[in-house]
Image (spheres, grey):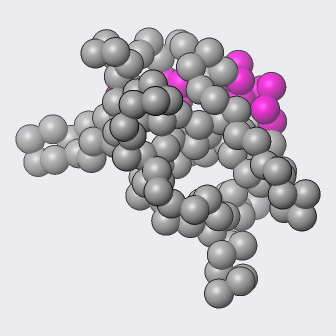
Amino acid sequence: MFKQVTYNTYIGKCKLALIKEGNLVDGTTKIGDIAYPVIILDKNRDNLKWPDYYLIGLYIAPTNDDPLSFFQMVKPYEKCTHHLYITGIPKGVKSIESFRLNDCIWSSYYEDKLHGYLFQIVRSNTILKLKQEYETIS
């Protein structure tokens, strides 16, 4: 929704350990410097609720031995199992539910003085749908 604002937001707000080429990504890295823009081609969709950016990679869930979640970024032509989507949301919105993706397996939300940021991971073979849109259709 706020593509330019989301572009300039620090990736460290996602509460995940991001790894790129074997190194931990600095939390002050701008989302727009490492992520790809989401492009919605369907003119009938409410584009204001769809994610702004995404990363491709492998999600590593927390375990008893390591309570931290990881996202190992990969290059577009490499095998990936998950996508991490980032959505800019207006501050003070009554509910972020209308921005949630169907089949999300991990999410976090961060709000600063002006905007909120929803981070969501889905499997890479998932057909991207908003959760409320999916519930309305089914």
| Residue at 71% in and 23% down | 7
Which quadrant does the N terminus fall into? top right
Image position, residue 112 (x, y; %):
67, 32
Residue 35 position by quadrant: top right
Image position, residue 44 (x, y; %):
89, 64
Number of disc labels: 0
Image position, residue 53 (x, y; %):
65, 35
Closer to the camera in the image, 2 or 109: 2
Closer to the camera in the image, 14 or 40: 40
Position of residue 35 relative to residue 65, above or below, is above
Task: Determine whether, in the image, residue 58 is placed left or right of residue 49.
Answer: left
Task: Determine whether, in the image, residue 94 is placed left or right of residue 75.
Answer: right
Image position, residue 76 (x, y; %):
50, 29
| Residue at 36% in and 37% down | 79
Position of residue 21 relative to residue 3, above or below, is above
The span picked out in magenta is 2-17
| Residue at 73% in and 51% down | 50
Residue lying furthest front in this view? 77
In magenta segment, residue 6: yes
Residue lying furthest bottom in this view? 138
In magenta segment, residue 91: no
Task: Determine whether, in the image, residue 50 is placed left or right of residue 124.
Answer: right
| Residue 122 seen from this side | yes
Residue lying furthest left in this view? 65
Position of residue 40 relative to residue 137, above or below, is above
| Residue at 69% in and 45% down | 51
Task: Determine whether, in the image, residue 47 is placed left or right of residue 119.
Answer: right
